[in-house]
Image (cartoon, helix red, strand yellow):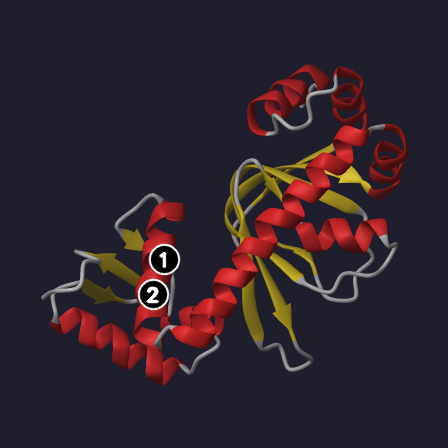
Amino acid sequence: MKPEDLRSLLHRHFPLLNNPELVDIIAERAVPLILPVGDVLLHPGDPVKLIPLVVKGTVKVARADATGHEVLLYYIQPGESCAMTLSSCLKREKSKVKATVQQSAEIIGIPAEVAYLLGRKFPGWYDFVLDSYAQRFQELLRMVDEIGFASLDQRLLHYLREQQAMQQSTVLHRSHQEIADDLGSARAVISRLLKQMERKGMVTLLRGRIKILSLVLPE
């Protein structure tokens, strides 16, 4: 991808990065990536070499323990970056999260040494970083509210609505186990709740997929 193409993508998806010199540096030194579903950008403990700016697709960010169990933190969508990766990069720490491509993604990768340069030279870069932190903080607050105050069936309903909006489809390519992992629950519990939703005419359950019929709770 040519620098002028990267400039166009940056202007379109990242309006906070509006300093021409800043944009020029990113466009000249960024690493464009096209990644398929399932690719892992980062594992916990990896050195942070690139800051991802997503221009297409979706990247799932999760905490993972030594056994491989994951808890969803948030998704990175077009026009967004990863607050946890930004934080680790600025502190020169290793990654604390796992980042996995959920929908085929196009990413502008900013090398860590370029990110350090941008931080020293451009106040607008820190505006972008702080905005990324603020977005993720709000999402984490919502997640805490859901875990603390919402029932699991309410969380599942919200999750399916969110997935439908992200995938822009009424057929969601998510298994019961993947949903259980994202919601920090057990597969059997999620399967039972989905069966209840199917009986209510809200979804149709397929192998590895869920067809959305109506995500409005019947009265």
Which residue type does callout 1 highlight? His
- Identified at 79% across, 66% down, the residue is 45
Q: Residues within 10 Å of mark 1 (few under 14, many from 20)?
A: some
Q: Which of the pair 142/159 is nearer the observer?
A: 142
- Identified at 55% across, 42% down, the residue is 105
Vertical position of residue 46 compared to residue 154: above or below: above
Residue 187 position by quadrant: bottom left
Q: Is residue 144 visible?
A: yes
Quadrant in the picture for the C terminus: bottom left
Circle nearer the N terminus (2, 1):
1
Secondary element at tag 1: loop
Q: Position of residue 39 (x, y in %)?
A: 60, 54
Left or right position of 164 against 71: left
Q: Residue furthest left?
A: 219
Vertical position of residue 187 compared to residue 37: above or below: below
Reading the image, the residue beneath label 2 is: 208
Reading the image, the residue beneath label 1 is: 173
Quadrant in the picture for the N terminus: top right
- Identified at 30% across, 46% down, the residue is 169
